[in-house]
């Protein structure tokens, strides 16, 4: 779907979504009835047109080449991409989205890596993270809202940095996600912006909307508001209710 969206973004063409994958994250965020294929087909044909944001990602790979892609849900570098790339296909067939949990448990141990991040052109700040992600919308499988503030039509992207040191920190992250809490925890930083730049001091494996894309050295993300026209259920998607924008100066400097 991501490849189709790249071609349709910025045009008058309308995208209809038929969720046949494992995670179906865009369909979940669009409130499509993913367990009712007939209803999804009906929405694709007779639903309401809605303009959503896309995010443009410019990436530098480890061999120095530059690539550019569009994504719709979430992209990241670090443990999230490691899990996506290491989830067994046979388990996806048998267990669906639960297969990602098995891979996630195997990748919990690991060390944090240093990055530099600039929000909306602000001064670069250093962090040590297990994962840095850019979200356009935040609902995951099983109703988990990983980034409650993220909306696909608010003209903003949401930056998420995970910096757990041990299992207890992972439990805090899981509890925040499962309870859909909007509170803050030190090991999970979130910011809203229109663009950001991330430099990876060590190459990190990356993913776009769940597709592993190899190791990167840096990436620049920029939101493109209302650039994709998509069919949604007639009355099931709420209006955007974005959280206040976090300005560059809101990103506190940290020292390892």
Image: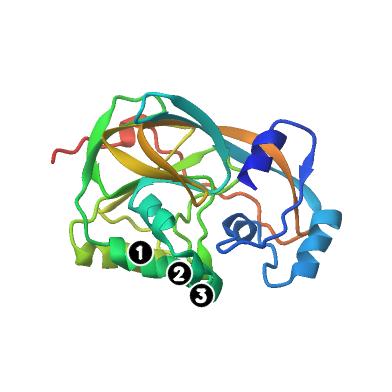
Q: Image quadrant for the C terminus?
A: top left
Of the residues under marks 2 and 1, which one precedes in the sequence?
2
In the displayed structure, 207 sits above or below 19; it is above
Q: Nearer the viewer, residue 82 or 126?
A: 82
Q: Residues within 10 Å of mark 3 (few under 14, many from 20)?
A: few
Which residue is denoted by mark 2 in the rendering? 99
Asked if labels 2 and 3 touch by Cβ distance under 8 angstroms, the answer is yes
- Residue 172 visible in the current orientation: no
Q: Residue furthest left?
A: 256
Q: Quadrant of residue 41?
A: bottom right
Q: Is residue 159 above or below residue 116?
A: below
Q: What residue is at 52 percent from the left and 66 percent from the top? A: 141
Where's residue 170, x and y in %? 27, 63
Q: Residue tagged by mark 3? A: 95
Colour setting: rainbow
Cα gap from disc 3 to disc 1, whole angstroms: 14 Å
Q: Which residue is mark 1?
A: 104
Helix, strand or loop for disc 1 = helix
Residue 215: x %, y % from top left: 36, 39
| Residue 136 in picture, x, y percent from top left | 53, 45
Tell me, yes or no, if residue 63 can be seen here. Answer: yes
Q: Residue furthest front?
A: 90
Q: Residues within 10 Å of mark 2 (few under 14, many from 20)?
A: many
């Amino acid at each position: 779907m991501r490849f189709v969206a790249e071609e349709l973004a910025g045009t008058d063409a309308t995208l209809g979504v038929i969720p046949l994958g494992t995670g179906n994250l865009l369909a979940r965020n669009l409130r499509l009835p993913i367990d009712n294929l007939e209803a999804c087909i009906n929405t694709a044909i007779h639903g309401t047109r809605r303009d959503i944001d896309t995010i443009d990602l410019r990436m530098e790979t480890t061999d120095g080449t530059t690539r550019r892609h569009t994504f719709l849900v979430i992209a990241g570098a670090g443990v999230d991409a490691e899990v996506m790339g290491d989830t067994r296909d046979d388990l996806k067939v048998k267990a669906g989205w639960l297969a990602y949990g098995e891979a996630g448990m195997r990748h919990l141990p690991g060390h944090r890596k240093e990055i530099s991040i600039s929000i909306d052109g602000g001064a670069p700040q250093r962090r040590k993270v297990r994962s840095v992600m850019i979200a356009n919308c935040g609902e995951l499988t099983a109703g988990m809202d990983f980034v409650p503030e993220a909306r696909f039509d608010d003209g903003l992207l949401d930056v998420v940095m995970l910096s757990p040191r041990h299992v207890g920190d992972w439990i805090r992250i899981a509890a925040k996600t499962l309870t859909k809490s909007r509170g803050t925890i030190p090991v999970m930083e979130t910011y809203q912006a229109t663009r950001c730049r991330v430099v990876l001091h060590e190459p990190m494996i990356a993913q776009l909307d769940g597709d592993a894309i190899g190791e990167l050295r840096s990436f620049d993300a920029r939101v493109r508001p209302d650039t994709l026209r998509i069919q949604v259920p007639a009355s099931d998607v709420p209006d955007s209710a974005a959280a206040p924008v976090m300005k560059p100066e809101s990103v506190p400097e940290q020292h390892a």
